[in-house]
């Protein structure tokens, strides 16, 4: 029997896709992003739920999905690391006609074509546009993420881009121009969100006795982040 390892379920998410979402946080991630705010999900841990059990929980919120064009979003951690559990769960959700969003950095273990055939929307986390800086920021090669991008483009699935803005790293015009160039790999982008770096997960590092490489990093000012976004939009307009 296929089982998965989940950390938690958020019943009424409003920021992880359209409408009201049930957000499922899957355990396990091969990246070690220096700004990660969910370090408790790095390891997979105990398998604690079957696809059938998870779908039964999601179905309880189905009336809210219909009224708001909502659905379920798989997040984490990195959901693509539990690919067989994810595929089986998504097949059951499709039978219920429930909209499925996948929040991912694209660093999984394959079967990307199969899972992308089942999801309706991809929320794609961009870590960095430069391979060396990506490695420095995540502790992982960029190669797998680029492979996922190639498969994603061929799938023709709609994409929402998510870019965390870390002070001193992404808050400059050079990076914004590199991001614009990088995103030309994808032709089905529906929206792009800039997310200001915050320190809400700092206490988790202390509780888990994990070194926090950004413990002294200042948070990204929200107004400055919005100004960067407007600059980015101008760059995109200039390079259409």
Image: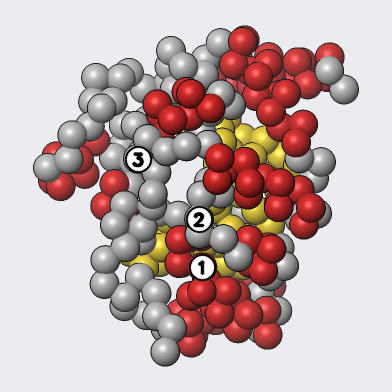
Residue denoted by label 1: 83
Q: Earlier in the sequence, mark 1 or mark 3?
A: 3
Q: Position of residue 182 (x, y in %)?
A: 69, 28
Does residue 49 appear left or right of residue 215 in this picture?
A: right
Q: Is residue 200 left or right of residue 84?
A: left
Quarter placement of the N terminus: bottom left
N-terminal label among 3 and 2: 3
Are the two marked residues, 3 and 2, in contact with CB atoms closer than 8 angstroms? no
Q: Nearer the viewer, residue 184 or 176?
A: 184
Instruction: From the viewer's side, name the closer residue of 48 and 72.
Output: 48
- In the displayed structure, 61 sits above or below 9; it is below
Percent coordinates x, y for residue 44 in the rendering: 31, 63
The disc label shown at residue 32, or none: 3
Looking at the image, tell me whether mark 1 or mark 2 is earlier in sequence order. 1
Residue for point 67% across, 35% down = 192
- Residue at image point 31% right, 37% down: 200
Crowding at dot 3, Cα within 10 Å, few <14 / some 14-19 / many 20+, comes out as some
* Dot label at residue 108: 2
Query: What is the quadrant of residue 203 in the picture?
Result: top left
The residue nearer to you, when weighing 62 against 219, is: 219
Please state the horizontal and vertical placement of residue 86, each as a whole percent of the image: 52, 71
Labels 1 & 2 near each other (Cβ < 8 A)? yes
């Amino acid at each position: 029997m296929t089982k998965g390892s989940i950390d938690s379920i958020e019943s009424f998410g409003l920021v992880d896709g359209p409408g009201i979402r049930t957000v499922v946080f899957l355990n396990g991630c091969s990246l070690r992003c220096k700004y990660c705010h969910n370090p408790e999900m790095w390891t997979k841990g105990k398998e604690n739920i079957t696809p059938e059990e998870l779908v039964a929980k999601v179905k309880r919120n189905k009336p809210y999905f219909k009224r708001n064009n909502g659905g379920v979003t798989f997040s984490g951690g990195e959901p693509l690391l539990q690919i067989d559990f994810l595929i089986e769960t998504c097949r059951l959700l499709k039978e219920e006609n429930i909209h499925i969003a996948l929040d991912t950095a694209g660093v999984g273990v394959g079967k990307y074509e199969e899972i992308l055939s089942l999801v309706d929307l991809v929320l794609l986390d961009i870590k960095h546009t430069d391979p060396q800086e990506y490695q420095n920021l995540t502790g992982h090669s960029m190669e797998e993420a680029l492979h996922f991008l190639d498969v994603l483009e061929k799938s023709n699935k709609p994409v929402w881009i998510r870019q965390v803005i870390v002070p001193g790293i992404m808050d400059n015009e050079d990076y914004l121009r590199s991001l614009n160039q990088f995103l030309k790999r994808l032709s089905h982008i529906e929206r792009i969100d800039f997310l200001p770096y915050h320190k809400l997960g700092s206490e988790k590092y202390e509780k888990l006795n994990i070194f926090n490489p950004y413990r002294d990093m200042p948070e990204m000012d929200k107004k400055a982040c919005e100004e960067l976004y407007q600059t980015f939009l101008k760059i995109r307009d200039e390079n259409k």
